[in-house]
Amino acid sequence: MELAQQTAQRIERATRKKLGEIFVDRGILSAVTVERLVGYARKKGKRFGTVLEELELVTPDELAQALAQQHNMKFLANFHRYRYSEELLRMIPAKVAIANLIFPLKLQEGKLGVAISDPTLAEVLRTIAEEHNVGVVPYVATHREIMLAIKVHYLKSAPAAASDKKNVLVVDDDQAVSQFITSSLKRKGYHVVCAADGMEAFKEIMSNRFDLVITDKEMPKLNGYAVLESLRTFPETEKIPVILITSTATVDEEATALKRGFFDFIPKPLREATLAVKVERALAMAEAY
C-alpha cells in the first residue's frame, strides 16, 4: 500500500504543471521572463515562488492561486473573519501553527480542513492526520491571511495602533539586559516591546509591526539565529533589520552573524552610546532601502 502511494506521488509530481507555466497561461508573466527568473532562483538558491514574491512580480493572491492550481487544491481567502471553536484550534497547537504557517478551518465527517501557504508540507499534515485519526484536506492561502488568522484566533490580538514612533522589539532572556536596552531606547524616543525568548518574539512579530529587532544570540526555545530565520521566511517581515547581541564577541562570530543576514552586531557588555549609534544607523538604512 505504501509503495503504491509513493508511486502515485511520483507520477503526480512528474505530471504536475510548473508554476511558471501557470503564470504564462494566465498572461501574468511571459515565457522569457519565467526562463530568466528560474535561472535567477537557481543562482540564489531560492524557490521560484519566493523570488516572485521578493521581486513583487505577482501579488500574494496570484501566487497562492497558482500554487493551488499546481497542486490541485482550492484557494481560500478572508477566513480569519470567521469564528473557530477552541476544540478545533487545539487540534493544531499554536506552536505548530506558527512554525509551519498552517491554520485549522473545520472538522466535518472525519476530515480536517487546514489552510496552508506551502503545499509541500506533506509530512506535517500526515503527522496531524495520524495524531487525530482524521483525513486532512489542505486549502492554499496567502502567508498574510494565515498570519492574520493565527494572530486573531490563537494570539487573541488586534492590529497595533498607528504611531509616529519607531517600534523596536528587544528579545533577551536576561531581564537586566532588556531593561538596559529599553531604558536607553525610550530616552531616544523609541517605542520598545520586550520578549523573553524567540517564541515569544515570534508571537509579537505576528501581532505587531516593528521597524527593528534586537535579539540576543543564546535563548531558550528559539535562539537569535532562529528569530532571524523566522523573519526572513515571510515577505511581510523579511526586510526588518535585525541586530544581534552576544557575549561571545569574536571576529569569527561577527563575520558569521553578518554573513547570515544580521544587519549589525553588538558585543556584551552593552554601551549606551554604541547601542544608540547602531540603532540609528539600522533604522536610517531601512528607510533608505
Image: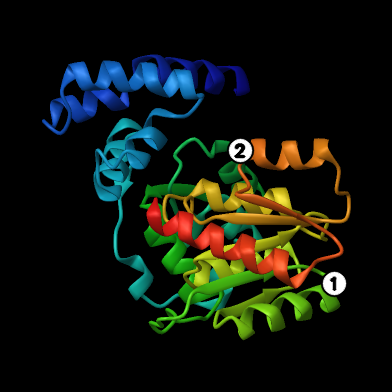
Q: Quadrant of the N terminus?
A: top right
- Viewer-proximal residue, 231 or 280? 280
Name which residue type carries label 1: Asp
> Taking 63 as reference, is 96 above or below it?
below
Q: Kindly identify which numbered label has been placed on residue 123.
A: 2
In the image, residue 54 lies at what x, y percent? Answer: 37, 41
Please tell me which residue is depicted at 35% across the width and 19% down the height of the picture: 38
In the image, residue 44 lies at what x, y percent? Answer: 48, 24
Q: Kindly identify which numbered label has been placed on residue 107.
A: none
In the image, residue 258 lies at what x, y percent? Answer: 66, 41
In the image, residue 178 lies at what x, y percent? Answer: 76, 75
Q: Is residue 46 left or right of residue 197?
A: left
> Taking 18 as reference, is 103 above or below it?
below
> Taking 78 as reference, is 189 above or below it?
below
* Residue 91 is at least partly visible in this image: no
The local crowd at label 1, few if under 14, some if 14 to 19, many if 20 or more residues have their Cα within 10 Å, is few
* Residue 165 is at least partly visible in this image: yes
Please tell me which residue is depicted at 45% across the width and 19% down the height of the picture: 42
Tag 1 near tag 2, CB within 8 Å: no
Nearer-N-terminus badge (1/2): 2
Using the numbered discs, state the Cα–Cα distance from disc 1 to disc 2 in whole angstroms. Answer: 36 Å
Identify the element where label 1 is drawn: loop
Please tell me which residue is depicted at 37% across the width and 61% down the height of the picture: 145
Q: Report the number of numbered marks.
A: 2
Q: Is residue 256 left or right of residue 246?
A: left
Name which residue type carries label 2: Glu
> Taking 14 as reference, is 63 above or below it?
below
Image coloring type: rainbow
Mark 1 — residue? 174
